[in-house]
Amino acid sequence: MAYTASDSRLVIGYDNLIVPEQIASIALGNATADAAYPVDNLKFEDPWRMLKVSTTPSGSPQINVVFNAAVNASCAGFVNHNLADGGYAYQVLYSTNGTDYTQIGSISAVTNGNVLLRFNSINAKWWRFMPYKASAWTSFRIGALFLGTKYEVETNPENDGGFNVAFENPVLFSQSSGNAKHLLHGPDKWTSSAELLFRRVSATMSYALTHTIGARNRRKMIAMIPPDQVTGYVPLAYEHFFGVLQGIYPSPSQGIGGSKINVVMRLEGVM
């Protein structure tokens, strides 16, 4: 078993299982969480609640998630983390009996960017997210975890301008009576948004985007690996996108080759 990077088109991770109603328990091993940022925060799709470990772990930290029943998954994600700063690797493991764990894969966190890791579908009740180092463990944070299903689209977004991602720092100004501008110091955070344009896709793909993914994941976090990043395991140019679907707009497209469908997707990043 290993992480995969064999896709050739944009990949979407959906049906996130890391939500309170799916989880029987979640526990932290080999480390002590900051009292204000406990491991229970990772049950929620809110990367600003987060888990923080402010002291030195005693070993490679383990985040052990037990589901109410066995679940199927083919992708896992780490959101709003700083694991690269500590020299950690991403390890994800699973168990079918709660005792013996099998490692899916391990790969270095080369940036602190959000990451979606892919693997062949696994059915298990016990899962372990493990920031791994052989020694010299350091403090760290993880804002949210993701465990879901991957979908490789049939048709990539338009080559030019088909997948636009914006990273923004919220900035507010106040203007005085003398016309001088003054910066208002609001929250210090990095936000993102994305818009995707798919031209002339099949009815099957349109249904997958609008119903299998869209309708089933309203107000839920989904993830995307852009077309230019699918041949790698971890993000390099810019991070994998995690966001909430704001709207999806299918429209018929007549032309040579029969009727097809244009689809626009708009998403707001979770951070």
Image (spheres, helix red, strand yellow):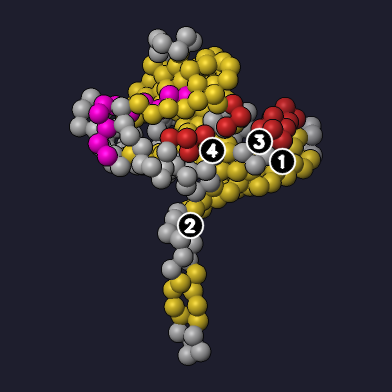
Mark found first going from the N terminus, 4 or 3: 4
Residue stretch in magenta: 55-65
The answer for how far apart the CA atoms under marks 1 and 3 are is 20 Å
Mark found first going from the N terminus, 1 or 4: 4
Q: Secondary structure at mark 2?
A: strand
Residue at the spot x=52%, y=43% of the render? 46
Q: Is residue 54 magenta?
A: no
Q: Nearer the viewer, residue 12 or 22?
A: 22
Instruction: Give the mark toward the camera: 4 or 3.
Output: 4
Relative to 169, does residue 74 appear above or below in the rendering? above
Residue farthest toward the left in the current orientation of the protein? 136
Q: Is residue 95 left or right of residue 243?
A: left
Q: Nearer the viewer, residue 264 or 144?
A: 144
Residue at the spot x=49%, y=10% of the render? 96
Task: Identify which amino acid the numbered label 2 is placed on.
Answer: Glu
Residue bearing the label numbered 3:
217
Residue farthest toward the bottom in the current orientation of the protein? 178
Residue at the spot x=42%, y=27% of the render? 27
Residue bearing the label numbered 2:
168
The answer for how far apart the CA atoms under marks 1 and 4 are is 33 Å
Residue bearing the label numbered 4:
44
Residue at the spot x=54%, y=24% of the render? 24
Q: Nearer the viewer, residue 158 or 90?
A: 90
Mark found first going from the N terminus, 1 or 3: 3
Mark found first going from the N terminus, 4 or 2: 4
Q: Which mark is residue 262?
A: 1
The answer for how far apart the CA atoms under marks 4 and 3 are is 15 Å
- Position in image of residue 224 (x %, y %): 53, 37
- Position in image of residue 39 (x %, y %): 43, 35
Q: Residues within 10 Å of mark 1 (few under 14, many from 20)?
A: some
